[in-house]
Amino acid sequence: MKTLKRFVLVGAPASGKGTQSSFLSETYDLKPLSTGALLRAEVAAGSELGLEAKKYMDAAQFVPDDVVNGIVTQWLGSNRNCGCLLDGYPRTVAQAQTLDANLAELGLAVDIVVYLNVSPELIEARMLRRKACPKCGETTRNGEELCPKCGTPMIVRTDDNPEAFAKRRRDYETLTLPVVEHYREQGKVVQIDVVEEGEPETVSARIEAAIKAYAEA
């Protein structure tokens, strides 16, 4: 039985990653890693990495890999004894390679990569139906007019249009999808294929079964 402590979740925009991230965190008692939250915390703390990151954040630029990698590695080292979920990182093969090397120096490694392989047609259909609550942030996928949590009128996200979706999809396929192949070569990928709409709970159950089989293999 494999010990699974460090999870990576990969999926295209609108693939249901947010829902399954919550499921994984709760089911396997994982501490989620958010690079955005980490960067903001380092900036607030005034650390050396935080001050470096702030220069780019203030200029609305991407924070360089070496800064992001340093903050992530520092966080993983501080949380080495607990389960962790990396969602949205690593975004590129270069980040994955650095992550692997930095974890190896700590005597750690990525244990499993959960890959949500949702068909582009289904993702586009979801994107066209998706709405967000401007008050509480709730996201729905059935075109609701009012937020099911707080009753606020729902809006269409500014990045939920065919042109923006196409660009995000291209960026994902070019930059992030190769990360799956990087870890597939290490035998660490659990792939969940989704080709038609269904309940999120059904996908969660499939993920749980696939992780169980992977751990026992």
Image (cartoon, rainbow, N blue to C red):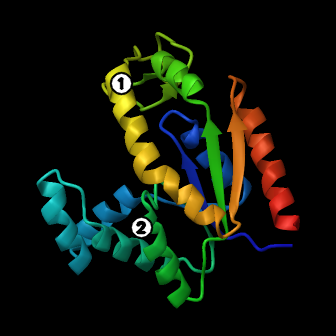
| On screen, residue 130 above or below 21 | above
Q: Secondary structure at mark 1?
A: loop
The C terminus is located in which quarter?
Answer: bottom right
Q: Which three-letter amino acid code belongs to the residue tagged 1?
A: Arg
Q: Secondary structure at mark 2?
A: helix
Q: Which residue is mark 1?
A: 157
| On screen, residue 81 above or below 204 | below
Q: Is residue 186 left or right of residue 128?
A: right
Q: 10 Å neighbourhood of mark 2: few (<14), some, or many (≥20)?
A: some
Please tell me which residue is depicted at 60% across the width and 64% down the height of the picture.
Answer: 183
Q: Which residue is mark 2?
A: 95
Task: Return the residue nearer the eye: 158 or 95.
Answer: 95
Q: Position of residue 21 (x, y in %)?
A: 60, 48
Ranked by sequence position, the earlier of labels 1 and 2 is 2
Q: Position of residue 60 (x, y in %)?
A: 16, 50
Residue 161 seen from this side: no
Q: Which three-letter amino acid code belongs to the residue tagged 2?
A: Gln
Q: Report the residue that reaches farthest toward the top.
A: 145
Figure disc tally: 2
Task: Return the residue nearer the eye: 54 or 210.
Answer: 210
Distance from disc 1 to disc 2, alpha carbons, whole Å, reads 28 Å
